[in-house]
Image: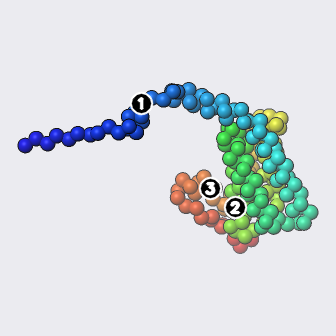
Amino acid sequence: MVVLTFHLTTRLAALAESFGGKSRDEAVADAGKALESMRGESDAVIEQSIGMLEELVRKAAVEEGCSQQYMQEILCLGDQIVTLAGTFTYKNLDIAARSLCDVTDGLIHQRRSNLASIQVHVQALRLMAPKSPPLTDEDVDKILSELAKIITFYGITRAADSAATGELEYSAVNDAQ
């Protein structure tokens, strides 16, 4: 006995198998052009966000402390910078902004506040902003290594590190302080 199986081709399956009006390479190139056309607007938003961070740090310094509300605002602005810096390939700005977010979030989870650590990160963002004068590779490496020391000091696990291991907990090595 022989069994014959017939597969009906639906209209949707036929459309999915046919090629569209653009090749993949053309679509990627067009998307890159469209994204590049938004770079100026993105740079302006990054500059504005850094300015707002600087203002928050100034206010916190006057009040001699960084409240949880300020910390949440810093985290939101930092996240916005991470998104834009990553999208528009500002690698060093992205790393510094991620570090700011890691420190801020870590301090929030540890129920601490350290304005100096946040202030150093905001100053690093200003130095690496798109419209700032370019830094040498040596200067960038030094700045990023100093920011990493702050993360290490507080025993904060970076979000990227914890995402890779599946752990999203913060280690609080210095909780006693």
Question: In this orientation, which residue lies closer to the viewer: 122 or 79?
Answer: 79
Instruction: Establish if 132 lies above or below 68.
Output: above
Instruction: Establish if 152 lies above or below 41.
Output: below
Secondary-structure class at tag 2: helix
Cα gap from disc 3 to disc 2, whole angstroms: 9 Å
Closer to the chain start, of discs 1 and 3, is 1
Question: In this orientation, which residue lies closer to the viewer: 12 or 56?
Answer: 12
- Which mark is on residue 64? none
Closer to the chain start, of discs 3 and 2, is 2
Whether residue 125 sits left or right of residue 1 in the image: it is right
- Which mark is on residue 18? 1
Q: Position of residue 87 (x, y in %)?
A: 66, 41
Classify residue 172 by image quadrant. Answer: bottom right
Closer to the chain start, of discs 2 and 1, is 1
Q: Position of residue 165 (x, y in %)?
A: 53, 56
Classify residue 42 by image quadrant. Answer: top right
Secondary-structure class at tag 1: loop
Whether residue 32 sits left or right of residue 69 in the image: it is left
Q: Amino acid at mark 3?
A: Ala
Q: Amino acid at mark 2?
A: Asp
* Residue tagged 2: 105
Q: Amino acid at mark 1?
A: Ser
How crowded is the residue under tag 2: few (<14 C-alpha within 10 Å), some, or many (20+)? many
